């Protein structure tokens, strides 16, 4: 597991605990905004932690790359053309769309490119 990119060691460990045989982690990024805790990318799937459930419940959603129909990067721009400090990706899977917001548009672009490289 060399060169794994991650924001939070605890989130990385959560992903490690749920790996399938032969699966390798590529990146784990902390997410901001309502609901989402983090996104993990492995060589087999996308893993999203959703904390929007009532109480202390949360969901871990696994999305095989083969199920992704599109991935979009949404970056906020000011009137002067400068990027703000956040970026968002939208992952379409069937009729569902998962939106994940990051601190910094560079992470959104990295996740976008990783998903495209794994899905093709």
Image (cartoon, rainbow, N blue to C red):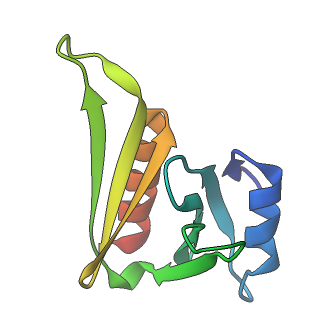
Q: Hey, which residue is sitting farthest left in the picture?
A: 79
29 or 32: nearer the viewer: 32
Determine whether 82 is above or below 69 in the image: above
**Image quarter of the N terminus:** bottom right
Q: Position of residue 11 (x, y in %)?
A: 75, 59
Determine whether 6 is above or below 52 in the image: above
**Rendered residue at 21%/16% (across/down):** 81
Q: Residue 72 falls in which quadrant of the image?
A: bottom left
**Rendered residue at 44%/55% (across/down):** 100
**Rendered residue at 47%/81% (across/down):** 63
24 or 97: nearer the viewer: 97
Q: Position of residue 115 (x, y in %)?
A: 41, 63
Q: Is 72 situated left or right of 64 in this image?
A: left
Q: Is 40 situated left or right of 23 in this image?
A: left
88 or 20: nearer the viewer: 88
Determine whether 63 is above or below 15 in the image: below
Residue 60 in view here: yes
Q: Residue 74 falls in which quadrant of the image?
A: top left
Q: Position of residue 57 (x, y in %)?
A: 68, 77
Determine whether 4 is above or below 66 in the image: above
Q: Position of residue 10 (x, y in %)?
A: 82, 57
């Amino acid at each position: 597991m060399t060169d794994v990119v991650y924001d939070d060691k605890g989130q990385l460990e959560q992903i490690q605990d749920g790996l399938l045989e032969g699966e390798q982690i590529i990146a784990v990024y902390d997410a901001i905004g309502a609901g989402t805790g983090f996104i993990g990318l492995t060589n087999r799937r996308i893993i999203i932690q959703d904390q929007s459930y009532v109480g202390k419940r949360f969901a871990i959603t696994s999305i095989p790359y083969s199920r992704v129909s599109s991935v979009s990067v949404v970056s906020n721009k000011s009137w002067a053309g400068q990027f703000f400090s956040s970026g968002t990706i939208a992952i379409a899977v069937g009729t569902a769309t998962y939106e994940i917001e990051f601190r910094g548009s560079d992470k959104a672009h990295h996740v976008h490119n990783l998903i495209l490289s794994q899905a093709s």
